[in-house]
Structure formats: C-alpha cells, structure tokens
Amino acid sequence: MTISTNPGELAFHFSSIKLLSSNGLVAAPLGQGIVHKQAMADEWTEINEGLPDRTHINRLQVYDDQLYACSNKGLFLCTDETWSSTELAIGCFQYKEFGEVGLAGTSCGLWFTEDSEWHLMMRSDVIVYDFLYLPQYVVLGTNEGLSILDRLTSTWMNFKYASAVTSLAIHHGRIIGVTEHGDLLVGNKRGQFERYRMGNSFLFSVVVLNDEIFACSDRGLYRVSHIGNRTSLMALKLGHQVTDVDADDRYLYLATLFEGIQRIERH
C-alpha cells in the first residue's frame, strides 16, 4: 500500500470519482493512476497495481461494488486492490452494465460482452465517448456528433456537429448531451437537437445519479431540471471547476480540476 503524494486537499486535476458501498471513495487524478480512501478519512492510498505504465483514466464505474476503470489502455477491473484486464484492450471511454451484459464505448465503436469474451456491437468507424441503451433506441455520443439507432426498424439517424459529443443522459424523455466544446445539446422531442452555450460556462459532463441529473462545469455543479418545455440548470456549488460527481444520502462528492475532492451536503 502506497500513501498518495496527491491527497484531495491539494490542487490537482481529478477527472472522475466514485463512491463504493463500503463508504470508500475512489478517484482518478489525471495522469496519476487511481487513489482510494474512506469517505471521512484524510489520507489517500494509491491502487495502481496491475495497471500498465502511462495509463490515463477516462472514467470510473461501479457495478455491484465492482470497480471498473475505462482507460486509454482498455477496460480494467479491480479486485482486492489489484487491477486486471477485462480483455478489452482498446481505448475505452465508457462502461455500463445491463443485467448480464456489459457494454463499452471505445475508440473503435460500441462493444459488448457476455461472460468474458468481447464482440463488436456497432459502428467500428467512430469513437464512442458515451452511449444510452434504451428500449427503442441506442444513442451514441461520437467524435462526429450523435448517432441514434432505432432498434425496431434498424435505421440510423446521424447528427453531425463541428465537435464530438462526449457525455449523454436522458431526462423527462429528452436526450441531453455535452459537446467537447462545452455546449449543451437538448432533444426537442421533434427529432432534432438544440445547442446551447450556458453563458460563459464550459460543461464537462452530465452525470445521472438515481433520478437526478447533474451538470459539471468550469463554474461549478448544477442540477438539471425542466420547467415546462425549457431545460434549466440550478446552481448547487459555484467556484470550483467540477469534472465529476457522485453521492450518498447525505453528501455530494465532487471531483475538481484545481481543488481536489470536495464534499458538500445535499439540499
């Protein structure tokens, strides 16, 4: 066990944070592997054993208290503080589980696994940064924009923008996305998307936590809501460049670019 030289109190770039059911926090400082601590403790410890050198963590995910790391070297699973490859060895940006099936957004399309063998599912010609797997649609956020597959008719709708779509969520039946240029995309329920610049804010991601959606930005953390047909952002914590968020019943845990890991009480 190595004590991290990079505790959350120091100014450091954190890209992702996840809360484990054991009341532990796991975070990814950019370019420095992965660190772990109990939620109320002060000291972080590094958990990098098994990760290749120069591994960059894009996202952390937790399913049934199993910790996954999406990285430039592939998808890794942590067991007893040791990482092992899931055998998906291409750049991975997102991982989600649906029952017994795992799906991964990669540098070569969307992949799926049952047991331990991975197979290409769709669109090997694009980078998939995020995705939604819905009853009727599969929505991909790609380097080209948005690609939506109607699963009933097997037809594609492609929305190409001048930037990649890197984060996706669905709220009140509307698809919401964030572009690599920090803009917000909102579905208008008429088959099109409206693109917004939220003042001078740069949005990093939208994060779904149970029935809530949060927007992480260089101005702070916002809660996404709808008033009539309008999407609104309500400020929860300003003054920090927030890149990711997770929560328990009492607190929100924020990964920030310059002020470590922050904890705020839920309202």
Image (cartoon, rainbow, N blue to C red):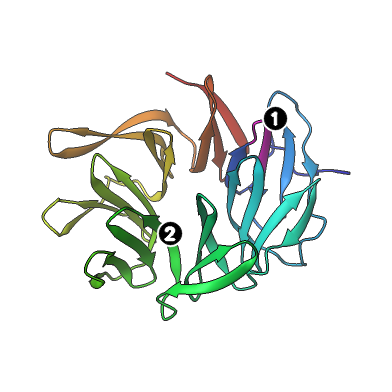
* Residue situated in front as seen by the camera: 254 or 76: 76
Q: Amino acid at mark 2?
A: Asp
Q: Nearer the viewer, mark 2 or mark 1?
A: 1
Q: Which residues are magenta?
A: 20-27
Kindly identify the residue that appears in the image at 33 percent across and 61 percent down: 138
Q: Label 1: few (<14), some or many (≥20) within 10 Å?
A: few
Q: Earlier in the sequence, mark 2 or mark 1?
A: 1
Q: Is residue 183 above or below residue 224?
A: below
Secondary structure of the residue carrying tag 2 is strand
Q: Is 22 in the magenta?
A: yes
Q: Amino acid at mark 1?
A: Ser
Say the numbered circle drawn on residue 22: 1
Q: Is residue 175 above or below residue 235?
A: below
Specify the quadrant of the image occupied by residue 88: bottom right
- In this view of the protein, can residue 29 be seen by the observer? no
Q: Label 2: few (<14), some or many (≥20) within 10 Å?
A: many
The spot of residue 232 in percent (x, y) is: 24, 36
Kindly identify the residue that appears in the image at 71 percent across and 50 percent down: 34
Q: Is 11 in the magenta?
A: no
Q: 52 left or right of 181?
A: right
Determine the CA span between mark 2 and mark 1. 27 Å
- In this view of the protein, can residue 237 be seen by the observer? yes
The spot of residue 15 in percent (x, y) is: 57, 50
Specify the quadrant of the image occupied by residue 254: top right
User: Most extreme residue toward the bottom, as rendered?
Assistant: 125
Quadrant of the image containing the N terminus: top right
Q: What residue would you read off at disc 2?
A: 130
Kindly identify the residue that appears in the image at 44 percent across and 67 percent down: 128
The spot of residue 151 in percent (x, y) is: 28, 64
